[in-house]
């Protein structure tokens, strides 16, 4: 699986935007970029995913570099409830054969702390 | 996105015993995934459970230790067998939803004493 690199931790103040970076220099042409977050004592939660174009949804925006070797998850206005571990994951939906299709490989993620 | 009910939410077990964790999804899915999250660590995939066939295990995980059942398209169980304190972790199930990413259960927090 292609690897991603994220900072171990980041801090933000409430109501301010947060830009969470992810490097994936070995990304393949068919890899989708997924972001998940894990709040304390909960299972991971889907945030957003994209392939080439920037993506927006109600939770966040995903900015993908033109060469796709990096991406940034943008939380437009951080709240205390956004404090979580954020995971950037590459997934190739073209993988078949049953065994590896669909699985997510988690890295260590970025611990986001939001200050009031 | 899918709703997943995972039971039990937590348990404290004696070493040498086994615990079966249940995962119920609110609609049919082809594949279900079981993960382990050791204290302070990220998630590690244990196995993929496909209905009607044997589960596929990741490197480092074996069927004798983590037997999995998948009797239908909405249900799966993971058993942690012959437990030791090293098995103390959070165990999570997950399913994929087309266009909506993956949904995870809330996890089973297992403590082995």
Image (cartoon, coloured by chain):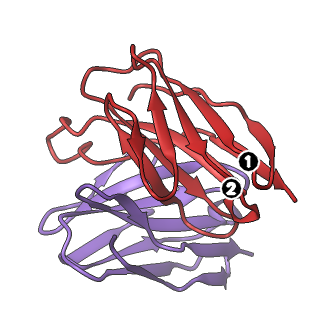
Chain colours: A red, B purple
- Mark 1–mark 2 CB contact (< 8 Å): yes
Given the image, what chain letter belongs to the residue carrying mark 1? A
- In the image, residue A70 sits, relative to residue B39, either above or below, namely above
The residue closer to the viewer here, A19 or B88, is A19
* Chain of the residue that carries numbered disc 2 in the rendered image: A
Q: In the image, residue A80 lies at what x, y percent?
A: 76, 63
Of A110 and B107, nearer the camera is A110
Earlier-in-chain disc, 1 versus 2: 2
Looking at the image, residue A80 sits to the left or right of residue B69; the answer is right
On residue A112, the disc is 1
In the rendered view, tell whether residue A4 sits above or below residue A59: above
Q: Where is residue A100 in the image (x, y as percent from the top left)?
A: 27, 42
Within the image, what quadrant is residue B24 found in?
A: bottom left
Give how far across and how far down residue A114 sits, in percent.
80, 53
Q: Which mark is residue A84?
A: 2
Q: Residue at x 70, y 31 (%)?
A: A7
Q: Nearer the viewer, residue A38 or B78?
A: A38
User: For the residue carrying disc 1, how many other residues have a C-alpha within 10 Å: few (<14), some (14-19), or many (20+)?
Assistant: many
**How much space separates mark 1 and mark 2, taking CA atoms?**
5 Å
């Amino acid at each position: 699986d292609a690897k991603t690199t994220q900072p171990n931790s980041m801090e933000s103040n409430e109501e301010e935007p947060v830009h969470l970076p992810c490097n994936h220099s070995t990304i393949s042409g068919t890899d989708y970029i997924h972001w998940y977050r894990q709040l304390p004592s909960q299972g991971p939660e889907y945030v957003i995913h994209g392939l080439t174009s920037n993506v927006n949804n109600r939770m966040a925006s995903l900015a993908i570099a033109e060469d796709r070797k990096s991406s940034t998850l943008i939380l437009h206005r951080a709240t205390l409830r956004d404090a979580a571990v954020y995971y950037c994951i590459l997934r190739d939906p073209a993988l078949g054969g049953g065994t590896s299709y669909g699985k997510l490989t988690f890295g260590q993620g970025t611990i986001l702390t939001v200050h009031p | 996105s899918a709703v997943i009910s995972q039971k039990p939410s937590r348990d404290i077990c004696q070493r040498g015993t086994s615990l079966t964790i249940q995962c119920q999804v609110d609609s049919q899915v082809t594949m279900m995934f079981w993960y382990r999250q050791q204290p302070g660590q990220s998630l590690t995939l244990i196995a993929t459970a496909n209905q009607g066939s044997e589960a596929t295990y990741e490197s480092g995980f074996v069927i004798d230790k983590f037997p999995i059942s998948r009797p239908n398209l909405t249900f799966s169980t993971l058993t942690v067998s012959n437990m030791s304190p090293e098995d103390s972790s959070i165990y999570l199930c997950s399913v994929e939803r087309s266009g909506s990413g993956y949904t995870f259960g809330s996890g089973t927090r297992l403590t082995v004493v």
